[in-house]
Amino acid sequence: MTRLLGSRAARLGIAVVLTSYLLWKNDPAAIGRAAAGAHWRWIGVACGLVLFDRALMAWRWLALLRPVTPTALGVGAIMRVFFVSSFVGTFLPASIGGDAARAYGVMRHDVAGGAAVASVAMDRALGVVSVLLLGLVSALTLSAVVPAGVWVLLAVGGAASLAAAAVIFVDAIGDAVGRVAIRLPGARLRHVTQRVLEAVRAYRHHHGALAGVLAASVAVQTLRVLQAWALGRSLGIEASLAVYFVAIPICVLIMQVPVTVSGLGTGQAAFLWTFAPAGVARPEALALSILFIALGIVGNLPGGLLFAFGGRR
């Protein structure tokens, strides 16, 4: 417990230090003026789009649970777990805390531990793949300047995704990973690892479900791009929609790295990096990053209401 609290404190410290440094170096008064002058009509559009992406995110997780859960699922209860865990994850490192809360929550509704963890892991993996796909297609096809280093990031992410896919779909590789799992120290760790591996590899027989979830994930990322574009319009940023389609997937990918809380610090740095080649001024880029992160928190607020008024369970 002490080590866990220390890790959370360290990530929170990194978020505070990095965010404070970026704000200090980029004219905090100008950033405040840009944010204060945001047009509320466009912010309302962005908030409306958040409702659609949260609904799609909830649907895709339910679609992943059904193939690996032999019993009938209570849709209402599962959706409550999704939204409450999303709210809890707002205050934990990147997405890891929310994912752990989601797996734990669904296990309390008679879903096997291996299947619960596998569904969350597959949901996260397909989300990353959708970000990479949208970023790659946008960078290759749209007329927007691609920041230096983006191709390296896409290549590393693509290689990691291919390696994960090989474990699931290639029997020889999956069996090899299984043989490594049975040699892990500790009976409990070996048991959990083997059960999760079995549950994840069960998805290789459910191509239709995976294709549907991947399509929904790409739609979620597209909605996030449109949300950022609407926020940019609220700030008076004149960058084209193509710039957002190139920049936002990269920003989302960086914000998911579990080194800070809710992408603070890393998100600001990512927005500065990706929007600078399009001529967006640094104060406006930082104001956009702050609004984008705040929009994600707003999208998680329904889970807070369920957490507060939905009963102890």
Image: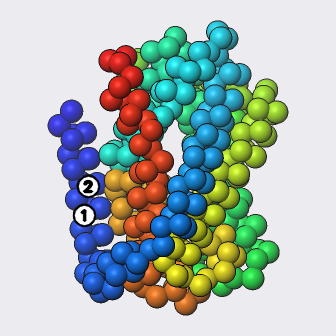
Looking at the image, which residue is at 48% across and 67% down?
Answer: 40
Q: Give the percent coordinates (x, y) of residue 203.
A: 71, 29
Residue type, label 2 = Leu
Q: CA separation, marks 1 and 2?
A: 6 Å
Q: Give the percent coordinates (x, y) of residue 26.
A: 32, 85
Quarter holding the N terminus is top left
Q: 56 left or right of 30? A: right
Looking at the image, which residue is at 47% across and 63% down?
Answer: 292
Looking at the image, which residue is at 65% across and 51% down?
Answer: 220
Near-viewer residue (52 or 293)? 52
Q: Give the percent coordinates (x, y) of residue 273.
A: 49, 79
**Which of the numbered marks, if any, corresponds to residue 12?**
2
Element class at badge 1: helix
Return the residue found at the far front: 41
Return the residue found at the far right: 208
- Where is 82 relative to 237, above or below? above
Looking at the image, which residue is at 25% across and 39% down?
Answer: 4
- Where is 269 relative to 50, above or below? below
User: What is the quadrant of residue 207 in the picture?
Assistant: top right
Tell me if mark 2 has few (under 14), some (14-19) or many (20+) residues whose alpha carbon lies within 10 angstroms of its own. Answer: many
Element class at badge 2: helix
User: What is the quadrant of residue 27 in the picture?
Assistant: bottom left
- Kindly check if marks 1 and 2 are in contact, taking CB atoms under 8 A apart as contact: yes
- According to the image, label 1 marks what residue? 16
Quarter holding the C terminus is top left
Near-viewer residue (205 or 281)? 281
Can the viewer see residue 223 in this picture? Answer: yes
Residue type, label 1 = Val
